[in-house]
């Protein structure tokens, strides 16, 4: 696939170029942020799960949010997408304050997330899963629903868009199958494709690689890169350093609810604080990309 | 023994007025539980709302039956909103608890002495509730049908009732094949996923509750019109569970599930009853008394349902492949 490789370079190069002069400190400001987070905190009992002073996500780049288990990555995701309410804090999406908005409103204005435990709608066909992602379908209003001539045209347009996406994600042969009959990896792909049906400006992937076999991981990574190439910003949670290194343009590291480091993947992996957070203090060897995967909790996997 | 007569009586009940009332409740429950996944354990409250709307408007206030039908729809909508707004944002179990409690509350309220002037207390409201409807009866006299043995009045109710039931089924078919139906099915599968795709899940669940409740209330209106009597203690919680049985029997989330389920349920229930009566009256069974038939037929019915769940757990119309899939 030479064409795709070329494309890949283009989006990646642009993101790297844009982020070149960004200082590598926690909470660094970006040249063109799509998402700006200020003083967001969330407490569970006595535990401060999230306490982020400032965070900016660069538009058009793939940003990885990493950190050991329990660092608060998923909680932060839930807060930003409206699935949980913070104790304090504000955040803006495209310069518009969206704190406290319901999840469905955030999705409609272009902020779409996926889940760590894949949520394929099992007893619905792959195609129906996809069509559910399309927004503005007037047949979803209860009265218009009874008048097919109102929504047929939209349905056709959505179907052909869904077919394109399914083809891109190699699911086009499965379109009539129940989503519940897909393999774990295919469900991840479907969830990603379905999120793209919403036509988001940013997709937030919560551990897209969790529970996927290594062979499929590579193709999943390719798909994520592809999302950026089409102009969509990607923010994803992961704790496997190798994968992060491969695809992200920028890495934000969380530990104990706070952002402890930021920077391009190479720099972050050499950061003393990050190594400490992952392996505990006074661990001898530095993190390199010599193939030693750094999954602090290989058997658990959920933060 | 006259087997033909047993069959005739059984079929008359399987397609008769009571079966129709349960059918409406089941069509409504199919929208709520079958397609949207709402655990409504108080469907009988919507039936009661429809029946009492007729009773109160026609008998207590001496107003038109047609107004009563409108009031029945309004009351059932209000009931759905009242039950839904506080609970539908919470986990599914809360709706279940609130609906079953509300249905009992409603029954105790209408049978209370405090409101005897309006709802008639424990005796309920009895009188010419459906007079305006029966006045429209175009049938000249009792019609001799080949199998069924309905009176002129019942036949008129049955004709209109089945017409309306088919219309309600058509409405459900139209809804669930549309993008609206896709959203509610998505909610049944996983609410959070649908929420993350930009759908206001709460509003859809409320709509499903209102639509399903309205259809069930129509069953209640039919009840009052056909039986010309509304009594509080007929609206016990077990009505709701018979409705669930009917729905699962036919196959949940199938457009024709409630129709088939209702016919089979009443065919079996009435059939066991008639057969047992005949066997006792003819001396074939001596260990049972005639007054025990009522309970015995429910036992046999339970056995039949167990067999169905063992050999065809997806219901008559269901798709076994769906059942094999993990719902979440």
Image (cartoon, coloured by chain):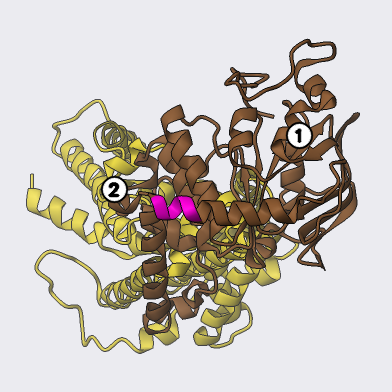
Chain colours: A brown, B yellow
Whether the magenta-drawn stretch holds residue B286 is answered as no
Indicate the position of residue B84 as horizontal and vertical percent values.
Answer: 65, 59
Residue B317 in the figure: left or right of residue B60: left
Mark 1–mark 2 distance (CA, rounded to whole Å): 57 Å
Q: Above or below — where is B299 with respect to A155?
A: above
Quarter of the image for residue A34 reads bottom right
Read off the residue under disc 1: A267
- Report the number of discs: 2
Q: Above or below — where is B297 with respect to A165?
A: above
Residue under the image location 64 percent in, 35 percent down: A238
Extent of the magenta region = A2-6
Residue A137 in the figure: left or right of residue B253: right
Q: Residues within 10 Å of mark 2 (few under 14, many from 20)?
A: some
Indicate the position of residue A242 as horizontal and vertical percent values.
Answer: 60, 29
Labels 1 and 2 touching (C-beta < 8 A) = no
Asked if one can make out residue B258 in the rendered structure from this viewpoint, the answer is yes
Residue under the image location 48 percent in, 61 percent down: A132
Residue A53 in the figure: left or right of residue A225: right
Q: Main secondary structure of the magenta part?
A: helix
Numbered tag placed on residue B318 in the rendering: 2
Residue A252 in the figure: left or right of residue A296: right
Q: Above or below — where is B312 with respect to A223?
A: above
Q: Residues within 10 Å of mark 1 (few under 14, many from 20)?
A: few
Q: Does label 2 lie on the same chain as label 1?
A: no
């Amino acid at each position: 696939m030479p064409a795709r490789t070329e494309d890949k370079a283009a989006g990646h190069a642009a993101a790297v170029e844009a982020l070149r002069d960004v200082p590598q400190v926690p909470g660094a400001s970006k040249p063109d942020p799509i998402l700006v987070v200020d003083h967001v905190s969330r407490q569970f009992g006595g535990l401060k799960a999230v306490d982020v002073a400032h965070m900016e996500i660069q538009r058009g780049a793939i940003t990885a949010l990493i950190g050991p288990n329990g660092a608060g990555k998923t909680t932060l995701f839930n807060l930003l997408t409206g699935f949980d309410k913070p104790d304090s804090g504000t955040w803006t999406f495209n310069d518009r304050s969206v704190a406290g908005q319901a999840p469905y409103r955030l999705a409609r204005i272009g902020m779409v997330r996926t889940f760590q435990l894949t949520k394929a709608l099992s007893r619905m066909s792959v195609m129906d899963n996809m069509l559910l992602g399309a927004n503005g379908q007037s047949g979803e209003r209860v009265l218009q629903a009874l008048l097919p001539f109102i929504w047929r045209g939209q349905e056709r347009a959505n179907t052909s868009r869904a077919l394109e996406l399914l083809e891109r994600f190699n699911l086009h042969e499965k379109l009539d199958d129940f989503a519940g009959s897909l393999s774990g990896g295919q469900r991840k792909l479907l969830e990603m494709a379905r999120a793209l049906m919403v036509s988001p400006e940013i997709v937030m992937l919560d551990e897209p690689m969790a529970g996927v076999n290594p062979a499929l991981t590579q193709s999943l990574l390719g798909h994520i890169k592809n999302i950026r190439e089409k102009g969509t910003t990607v923010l994803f949670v992961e704790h496997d350093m190798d994968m992060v290194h491969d695809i992200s343009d920028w890495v934000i590291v969380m530990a104990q609810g706070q952002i402890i480091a930021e920077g391009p993947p190479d720099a972050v992996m050499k950061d003393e604080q990050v190594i400490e957070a992952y392996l505990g203090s006074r661990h001898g060897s530095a993190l390199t990309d010599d193939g030693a995967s750094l999954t602090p909790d290989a058997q658990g996997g959920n933060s | 023994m006259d087997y033909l007569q047993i069959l005739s009586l059984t079929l008359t009940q399987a397609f008769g007025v009571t079966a129709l009332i349960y059918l409406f409740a089941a069509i409504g429950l199919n929208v709520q539980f079958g397609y949207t996944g709402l655990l409504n354990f108080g469907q009988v409250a919507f039936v009661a709302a429809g029946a009492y709307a007729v009773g109160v408007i026609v008998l207590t206030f001496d107003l038109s039956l047609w107004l009563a039908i409108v009031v029945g729809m309004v009351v059932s909508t209000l009931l759905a909103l009242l039950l839904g707004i506080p609970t539908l944002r919470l986990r599914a179990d809360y709706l279940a608890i609130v609906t079953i409690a509300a249905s009992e509350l409603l029954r105790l309220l209408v049978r209370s002495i405090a409101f005897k002037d309006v709802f008639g207390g424990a005796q309920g409201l009895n009188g010419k509730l459906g007079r305006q409807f029966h006045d429209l009866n175009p049938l000249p006299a009792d019609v001799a049908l080949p199998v069924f043995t309905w009176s002129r009045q019942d036949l008129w109710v049955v004709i209109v009732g089945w017409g309306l039931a088919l219309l309600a089924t058509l409405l459900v078919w139209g809804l669930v094949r549309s993008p609206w139906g896709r959203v509610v099915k998505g909610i049944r599968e996983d609410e959070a996923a649908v929420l993350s795709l930009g759908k206001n899940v709460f509003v859809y669940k409320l709509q499903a509750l209102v639509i399903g409740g309205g259809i069930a209330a129509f069953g209640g209106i039919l009840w009052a019109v056909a039986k010309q009597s509304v009594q509080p203690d007929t609206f016990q919680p077990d009505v709701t569970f018979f409705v669930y049985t009917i729905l699962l029997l036919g196959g949940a989330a199938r457009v024709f599930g409630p129709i088939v389920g209702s016919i089979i349920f009443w065919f079996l229930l009435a059939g066991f009853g008639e057969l047992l009566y005949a066997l006792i009256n003819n001396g074939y069974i001596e260990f049972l008394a005639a007054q025990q038939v009522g309970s015995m037929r429910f036992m046999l019915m339970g056995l039949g349902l167990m067999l169905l769940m063992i050999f065809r757990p997806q219901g008559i119309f269901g798709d076994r492949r769906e059942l094999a899939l993990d719902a979440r």
